[in-house]
Image: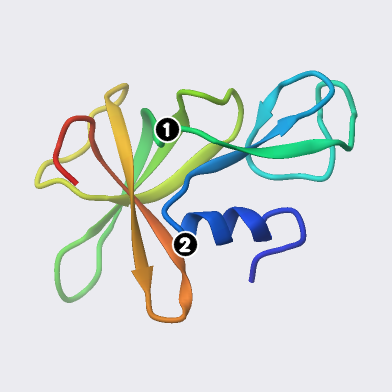
Amino acid sequence: MPDRDAREWWERLAGGEFAVQECEACGVRRWPARAFCAHCRSEEWRWRAIEPVGTVESWVVSHRPFGDGATVVMVRLAAVSGGPVYGSWEAVREPVGGEQVRASFTDVDDAPTLIAWRPYGQPL
């Protein structure tokens, strides 16, 4: 379940918007969401929509006894220094470290919206 700091992020994601927190005092963007700015310690912030693009930093393939493996990628956002964003991989090939990717969003019944990453420029 979303916590106090990330609840609005999940709501925005469900609406198709990728947003991060931005400190009102110093302007530093941060991810993941938290109550105060690690740079200046301010507790004043706002949500800022960003383009959901980043760079593949790492990935893991989960092998199951039946069916194909699922690939999960760790992506560093272009617009935010700091924390990674994880999501599924949506391409027929393996990811490549350092390649640029774009997020897409998948609604799953009553569950939170999920993030999937695909090579930048690949149609959504």
Q: What amino acid is at disc 2? A: Ala
Q: Position of residue 58 (x, y in %)?
A: 38, 35
91 sits to left or right of 104: left
How far apart are the alpha carbons under marks 1 and 2? 15 Å
Q: Nearer the viewer, residue 7 or 69?
A: 7
The vertical placement of 63 against 26, above or below, is below
Indicate which disc residue 38 carries: none
Amino acid tagged 1? Glu
Which quadrant of the structure image shows residue 22? top right
Q: Could you tell whether 72 is left or right of 47 in the image?
A: left
Classed neighbour count for the residue bearing mark 1: other residues with Cα under 10 Å, few (<14), some (14–19), many (≥20): few
Q: Position of residue 118 (x, y in %)?
A: 24, 41
Q: Residue at x 29, y 32 (%)?
A: 101
In this image, 47 relative to 102: left or right? right
* Residue hosting label 1: 51
Q: Which residue is mark 2?
A: 14
Q: Quadrant of the N terminus?
A: bottom right
Looking at the image, is 68 positioned above or below residue 108? above
- Mark 2 lies on a secondary structure that is helix
Furthest residue toward bottom: 110
Q: Residue 66 placed where, x, y %?
A: 17, 76
Q: Residue at x 83, y 45 (%)?
A: 35
**Count of number-bearing discs:** 2
Q: Residue at x 81, y 31 (%)?
A: 37
Name the residue: 49% across, 33% down: 50
103 or 47, which is in the foreground?
47
- The residue nearer to you, when weighing 107 against 55, is 107
Q: Are marks 1 and 2 in contact (CB under 8 Å)?
A: no
